[in-house]
Amino acid sequence: MRKLLRDALGRFKSIKVNLLDGQRRGEVVFRRVFFLLTMGMLLYLLLLTFVGRKDQEQAQIEIKPEKVEAKEVIEDKEEWVDGDRVTTKADGSVEVVPAENFMDSQVQTIRKFTQAYPGSRIDNEYFAYLDKYCSDETLRTVIAISVAESSMGKNSKRNSNWYGWFKGGNRNYDPSQEEMAKVICTGVEKYYLGIGSDNNKVKRYVGGDPTNWMKNFNWAYNQMET
């Protein structure tokens, strides 16, 4: 009996317990579960990192600004030539709207008279300047003065001053057509409207016997009646 107890005690002392060795079943199960959980967490974190990076790259692609090529826009070019409106379109075609379309009936009547008058030197460009700076009544008066003074430029060697207008006492005054148009329109409107029925104005303008001058002026003035 004593021998049996000694042998049993010797076997019990020889058993060594080491949890890290995983010799027990519960221990083995725990370690395997822990390993699987750890691997699972690592895989989950890797998946999150990969998916997040993918989403970020996708977002960058989506918000990447598109390059827009600037295209030259060719617009219609509009200019005025002798009172006509000339429009050059983008396709190269040209549209011309005659000056008469932009004139009221009084101005149209005056323009037709200057075109029909024999030897007239008032072309479209010069007429456009006169129309620009003169009121309708002033324009009619200026044209009639040009007839009385020089037969609308036919009897004058000057380039623009066909009205016998002396600026600052300069008898040789002959500026550009635009300057002349501006000066004659301003001067006549200020001092000589109604000259056809005002002897004092006529004498001041003509400076001599106004009989023939008045006859020619009134004839021309009446031709432009609307």
Image (tube, rainbow, N blue to C red):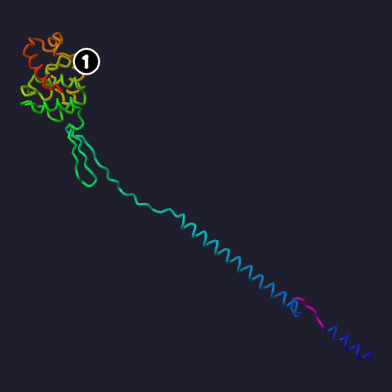
Image location (x, y in percent) of residue 5: 91, 88
Q: Residue furthest top?
A: 200
Task: Name the image quarter holding residue 8.
Answer: bottom right
Q: Give the quadrant of the N terminus.
A: bottom right
Query: In the shown orientation, is residue 34 left or right of residue 140?
Result: right
The majority secondary structure of the magenta stretch comes to loop
Query: In the shown orientation, is residue 8 left or right of residue 119?
Result: right
Residue depicted at 20% across the width and 22% down the height: 136
Query: In the shown orientation, is residue 196 left or right of residue 77?
Result: left
Asked whether 29 falls inside the magenta stretch, the response is no
Q: Nearer the viewer, residue 158 or 111?
A: 111
Estimate how packed mark 1 is, as few (under 14), some (14 to 19) or many (20 or more) residues with alpha carbons within 10 Å.
few
Q: Give the quadrant of the C terminus.
A: top left
> Which amino acid, mark 1?
Lys
Task: Name the image quarter holding residue 20.
Answer: bottom right
Q: Is residue 114 above or below residue 78?
A: above
Q: Is residue 175 above or below residue 69?
A: above
Residue depicted at 22% across the width and 47% down the height: 91
Residue depicted at 37% across the width and 52% down the height: 68
Residue depicted at 20% across the width and 17% down the height: 189
Q: Is residue 206 above or below residue 44?
A: above
Q: Nearer the viewer, residue 161 or 79?
A: 79
Q: Residue furthest front?
A: 226
Q: Is residue 7 above or below residue 90?
A: below
Task: Name the image quarter holding residue 169.
Answer: top left
Image location (x, y in percent) of residue 203: 12, 9
Q: Nearer the viewer, residue 104 or 18?
A: 104
Image location (x, y in percent) of residue 115: 10, 28
What segment is highlighted magenta in the picture? 15-19
Looking at the rendered structure, the number of numbered marks drawn on it comes to: 1
Q: Secondary structure at mark 1?
A: helix
Instruction: Report which residue position mark 1 lands on.
Output: 190
